Image: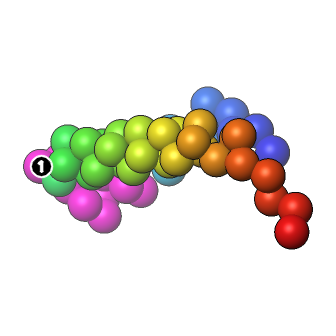
Amino acid sequence: MKLGTMELLVILVIVLLLFGPTQLPKLAKMFGKAKKRFDQSSEENTGEDLSV
């Protein structure tokens, strides 16, 4: 499922209304760190064999 421009704008407006403009930088930083950790852990797990 792909999100279009209008959907992203609606989501951004809702987030802005919920958290306010002062909280957005903190929220973006938190999501950036979480994405970085997720990417690092997924790179580490690509070499592992999941079969038992």
Judge whether residue 24 can be spotted in this image: no
Q: Nearer the viewer, residue 4 or 26?
A: 26
Residue 27, position in %: x, y?
A: 27, 51
Q: Residue at x 25, y 42 (%)?
A: 29
Quadrant location of the C terminus in the rendered image: bottom right
Q: Is residue 15 magenta?
A: yes
Residue drawn at the location 61% of the way across and 30% of the way down: 5
Which quadrant of the figure has residue 7?
A: top right
SS class, disc 1: loop
User: 47 or 36, which is in the foreground?
Assistant: 47
Part of the protein shown in magenta: 13-22
- Quarter of the image where the N terminus is located: top right
Q: Is residue 29 left or right of residue 15?
A: left
Residue 15 lies in quadrant: bottom left
Please tell me whether the stretch drawn in magenta is mainly helix, strand or loop. Answer: helix
Q: Amino acid at mark 1?
A: Thr
On screen, residue 20 versus residue 4, left or right, reads left
For label 1, the residue is: 22
Q: Residue furthest top?
A: 5
Residue found at x 71% / y 40%: 47
What colour scheme was applied to this rendering of the protein? rainbow
Residue 17: name its quadrant. bottom left
**Image location of residue 36, percent across then percent down:** 41, 39
For this rendering, which residue is in front, 37 or 49? 49
Single out the residue that lies furthest toward the bottom.
52
Q: Residue furthest front?
A: 52
